Image (tube, rainbow, N blue to C red):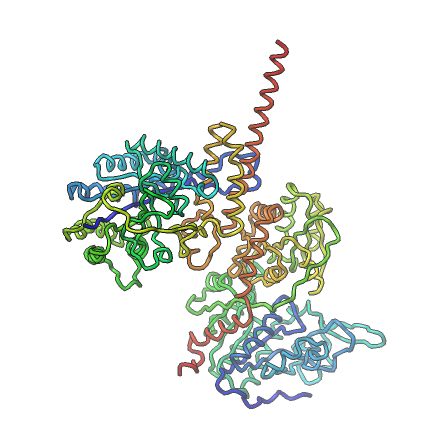
Amino acid sequence: MPSVCFYFQVHQPFRIKRYSFFDIGKDHFYEDDEKNQIILDKVSEKCYLKTNRKMLDLINRHKGKFKISYSISGTAIEQFEKYRPDVLESFKDLAKTGCVEFLSETYYHSLSFIFSKDEFRRQIEMHRAKIKEHFGQTPKIFRNTELIYNNELASVIEKMGFKGILCEGVDRLLNGRTPNYLYQPAGSLKIKTFLKNYSLSDDIAFRFSDRNWKEWPLQADTFASWVHQIAGNGEVLNLFMDYETFGEHQWEETGIFDFLDYLPKEIMSHSDFDFKTLSEAADSYKVRDIYDAPDFISWADAERDLSAWLSNTMEKEAAKRIYALEDRVIKSENKDLIEVWGKLQTSDHFYYMCTKFWSDGDVHKYFSPYDSPYDAYIYYMNVLADFESTIELFYKDKKEAKKLEKKKESVE
Amino acid sequence: MPEITKPAPVKTPDLPKILMLGWEFPPVINGGLGVACHDLCIALSKYANVTMIIPKSNPDFVVKNLNLIGLNTIDAKTLRNIGFAGENYKKLNKVHYIDTHLNPYYNGKTAGNQPLDLKSQYLKSVQIGNETAEVFHIEDLYGGDVIEKVTVFGKLAAKLACSLDFDVIHAHDWMTMIAGMEIKAQTGKPLVMHIHSLEVDRGGPNSKGWVYQMEKHGMEYADVLMPVSHFTGKIIHDYYGIPMSKIHTCHNGIRPVVPFKGEKLFKEKMVLFVGRLTRQKGPEFFVDIAEKVLEYYQDVRFVMAGTGEYFNPLLERAAQKGIAHRFHLTGFLNLDKVRQLLSIADVYMMPSVSEPFGLSAVEAVQFGVPSVISKQSGVSEVLQGSLKFDYWDVQRAAQYVLALLNDEVLSDKIKEDAYKDLENISWDNASQTVIAGYKKFNLIQDKVTS
């Protein structure tokens, strides 16, 4: 009896403002509060509230048989807390149904695994606490930023006690096999890997409104019939996508909400099919084969690797510089410094610096708040310059405070 | 007196036949128009039979060993003598020279067959050794009785055109518009106007003089307009009221060069500006940007290569701001000298107010110099690898210059990206776009498909 697993990514970065060279040393507030709020408001109205309402309705209508999973980044939750508590409430309502699972990820939606395992674990713990606080669940399944994944990651995650991990079903690694089973990561023993079925996922996430697509307009029953084709050759169908697909990337006018409205019914019209949260699927199905990913893969761009964030010299330089600060920042034990440092790690900052202009460049441009990848880099590096001097100032002040104290002591 | 050249039999009947009308042509170059026309023609001759009509004067006035070659001295012989793209000329099917007594002799009142006796305000006596030569100063190319010049050129070109066989008339800028219109009126052949520069670029948006009227009238009369950028296409639409449906953008190409690395005789970094010192090029913004940058970064020199009516005001402005010790005006420099500067520059700056294309920025790329260019330029459409600002946004431009001076990663990355852009900037691409335009508007038959 095959199961369909929906997982939706909810993420918003704290975008940094057009922080100019002339601001260095004068302005220590890096975020573009106005833009962040405007975007969150827009996406809340177009996507989060509407889709959450639809999901709640579907769960109620199907009497608990429709199940979904979310991963919400820490930065997104912070923004809900700050600007849109109503959205946060609607996610809590979903959590209460018992049909919704919340996954684990790095708090800042960061690339930390690549640069620092300590920081990576710290962010997972932070995120775990945040999810527990709002949704009363402790995540059992992990998904890394933009499905960045390799064997080593799976092994680290296994050691942290997770029972499942998500990743992209990359053709070259599947080598003719289907993504529709649970796999065992090479080098791990217990943890189960969920592979995204990118073909069916992208039919919804990317192609749905494409009028040049031969399947346009896509109807729920057509899509369900494709899903049903896996019967006999698959157990877990993983439909992973950005939550913003609903209403934001695919506007309401495209009929995406109507599609969603009929989809559970159409899929369950085949009595063998059901919906499961990822934890339920991990408990219900055995691994069928080994998935060997020695190198990093991801769900981003055509390359499905790290090139969306770390392909050019600017991205590499910026990442190198921010992670070089780890020791100084963590040892400062200063809450503000640690928080700013965390937010500057959000992968989006690097995504905006991407210069793969040609086919994927358009997607990067769509999401970027800046005029060019160079601007993204320049503002980021200006911020970093200010942040570095703030850290140094902090240590200098601390040293002087100590000196002063010693002086006092000796006087006394 | 030389006769008007009779058309030679067409060599390759399959290729479309283009009648080009040019004004500037090497070696008489004022701005980039002459080079652009020349290089486009050469590249286009691969895809079409090109016949070029340009103004011409009496070849007797060629003076040996004189570097300054005036409009009057242009003929095939001169071009060969000075070795300017001699081989390339053979590729052109024909270059026709009309004996118009136009430049510099024509004064409108004594039109006739006695050019040698004419007196003109544009004539200048030059003494070289024992010889006295009268030449035409290129700065005066567009001055004075230019209306009559272009009108007479038009009439004579039209007369010549009647004896030629061609499919399309292809005129360049307002100087040849009358000629283009006359020929279209007489032959009924479709008229394409290639727009390299407009009065609105040169004089600002309030230009409403004769040239503006000429351009407007000409572009309304033309069948297709080929501006050198979308930026210029938009000006044609916005300021001249021409429908976008008539506009087909053809970005310029550039001649390949072999870049070299020069030796810099000072330790400071260098930010370079190359261009005429006129309103259009925004030179005063360069001074303001320099001032802003120098506040934060002292080890840098700002160099302006070029001359123009802003020369003295700029000098004063720099002195007034107290940055004269880091600010250098070179005056007019020839191509070799400009290239030497490019070979040692660290940043190229183009703050143009209205730049139809801006080939100099591409030259900077050829020399591996990262560029900071205004968005009000055509070249910004083809150079991904550059930092772009609105010409009035001095803060932003200064920030970019500082970023490039401070950050080698950024500077190298922009160089690298710009090199990739260079692959698509060629006269061959430009001429293919021209041909595609002819086909798109059904001016010529698509021989391949038919």
Q: Quadrant of the C terminus of chain A?
A: top right
Q: Is residue A50 visible?
A: no
Residue at position x 45%, y 36% from top? Answer: A119
The residue furthest right is B130
The residue most toward the top is A412
Give percent across and percent down for residue B385: 54, 56
In-image side of A290 versus B305 (left or right):
left
Vertical side of A379 occupied by B366: above or below = below
Place of residue A142 in the rendered image (x, y in percent of width and height, measured from the top left) = 34, 41
Nearest the viewer among A207 and A174 is A174
Residue A401, quarter of the rendered image: top right
Q: Position of residue A159 (x, y in %)?
A: 37, 38
Q: How many labels does the image show?
A: 0
Of A63 and B430, the residue lying toward us:
A63
The picture quadrant where one finds residue A84 is top left
Q: Is A50 or A303 nearer to us in this picture? A: A303
Let me know if residue A355 appears in the view.
yes
Q: Where is residue A24 in the image (x, y as percent from the top left)?
A: 56, 37
